[in-house]
Image: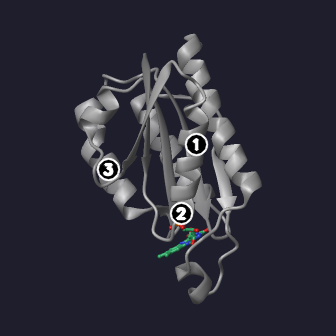
Amino acid sequence: MKTLVIVMHSLTGGTRQMAEAAASGAAREPLVSTRLLSASEAGPDDLLSADGYLFATPETLAGIAGLMKDFFDRAYYPTLGRIQGRPYASLICAGSDGHNAARRIARIAAGWRLREIAEPLIVCTRAQTKEAILAPKTIAAADLALCADLGEALAAGLAAGIF
Ligand SMILES: Cc1cc2nc3c(=O)[nH]c(=O)nc-3n(C[C@H](O)[C@H](O)[C@H](O)COP(=O)(O)O)c2cc1C
């Protein structure tokens, strides 16, 4: 049995829906156990005990969300040199961009020597005004399907020993 861990943070629900969709996609693979963790509760042991990773964050202030940064800060050195080669992918929920958050995760993963198995999946909610940014988000079914497919692909690759 392989383990996929999804580490996520969400302020207004968009990233949470994406991460949950990815988890349900991964659950289609019976040989992989999927754990969906909030960034604030996740730590280095969760990475050490998993075989692959999905990192899911909103883009905030042209970067990853603060609690995701806190997770990476806490987990980076305790796991450095112990998880290299493991597969990962990222989910980004953004108002209008998302690429800075994706680049930041890619830099951290490169330091860990993780293997990126897919391009970052960026979903833009088109939230531009203060009111829209602070409102609860509803991610479109088509985008959730892409998240589910990514979760399934990661899990299937783990189960098959491809990654
Ligand atoms: C403080 C703050 C800063 C933000 N900065 C950005 C940004 O730099 N780029 C962007 O595309 N979206 C930005 N957004 C919009 C969020 O990425 C967007 O609302 C997204 O849906 C949040 O994901 P969530 O629903 O999982 O919290 C920002 C939102 C907040 C609250």
Instruction: Judge from the rendering whether residue 124 lies leftward or rightward of residue 157; answer left or right.
Output: right
The residue where tag 3 is placed is 71
Q: Are the residues tagged 2 and 1 within 8 Å (C-beta)?
A: no
Give the foreground label among 2 and 1.
Answer: 1
Amino acid type of the residue tagged 2 in the rendering: Glu
Image quadrant of ligand 1 equals: bottom right
* Distance from Cα at disc 2 to Cα at disc 1: 18 Å
Say which element carries label 1.
helix
Instruction: Judge from the rendering whether residue 125 lies leftward or rightward of residue 24; answer left or right.
Output: right
The residue where tag 2 is placed is 59
Residue 119 seen in this snapshot? no
Mark 2: C-beta under 8 Å from nearest atom of ligand 1: yes
Query: Which residue is outermost to the top?
Result: 161
Q: Are the residues tagged 3 and 1 within 8 Å (C-beta)?
A: no
The residue where tag 1 is placed is 22
Q: Residue at x 57, y 79 (%)?
A: 133
